[in-house]
Image (cartoon, rainbow, N blue to C red):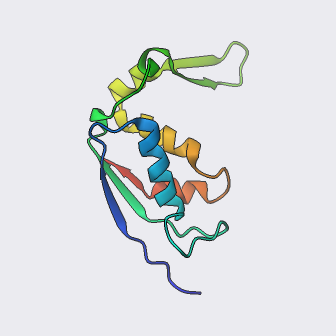
Amino acid sequence: MDKIERQIHQIDATGKVVGRLASGIAIILRGKNKPTFQPHLDEGDFVEVVNCDKMKFTGKKLEQKEYIRHTNHPGGLRRKKIKEVFKKNPGEVLKRAVMGMLAKNKLQEPMIKRLKIK
């Protein structure tokens, strides 16, 4: 088995739309941009993202989009507007978007660990 050579991709998020940026990052993390891509192997690269606080949102996402989770207790539905999360930690919004675009399998965690948000 050959050693996987991983490169570091640096991306500036200034003025970029969150969803389009996240899909590009997910492709790099998964390794789909390489000619040696195989779905069962984790051959992706490292991604460093800077200036997350300057990303753009299209439409009314900042006012309308919510993150929803449940505590598994009765009445435990918790909602947070994306505006609150973005104000507190802009990188969390991008990380959640990328997580939603990665494969839902045991390779997801090692892939998301290679995403560095500054």
- The answer to which image quadrant residue 109 occupies is bottom right
Look at the picture and state if 17 lies above or below 50.
above
- Most foreground residue, 114 or 28: 28
Q: Residue at x 44, y 14 (%)?
A: 63
Q: Residue at x 53, y 74 (%)?
A: 35
The count of marks equals 0
Q: Position of residue 111 (x, y in %)?
A: 52, 58
- Most foreground residue, 39 or 117: 39
Q: Residue at x 57, y 41 (%)?
A: 100
Left or right of 10: which side holds 23? right
Q: Residue at x 42, y 20 (%)?
A: 62
Q: Position of residue 14 (x, y in %)?
A: 26, 40
Look at the picture and state if 1 lies above or below 56.
below
Q: Position of residue 85 (x, y in %)?
A: 41, 26
Left or right of 30: which side holds 21? left
- The answer to which image quadrant residue 77 occupies is top right
> In the picture, which quadrant includes the N terminus?
bottom right
Q: Position of residue 17 (x, y in %)?
A: 38, 36
Left or right of 101: which side holds 54? left
Look at the picture and state if 31 lies above or below 85.
below
Seen from this angle, which residue lies furthest bottom? 1
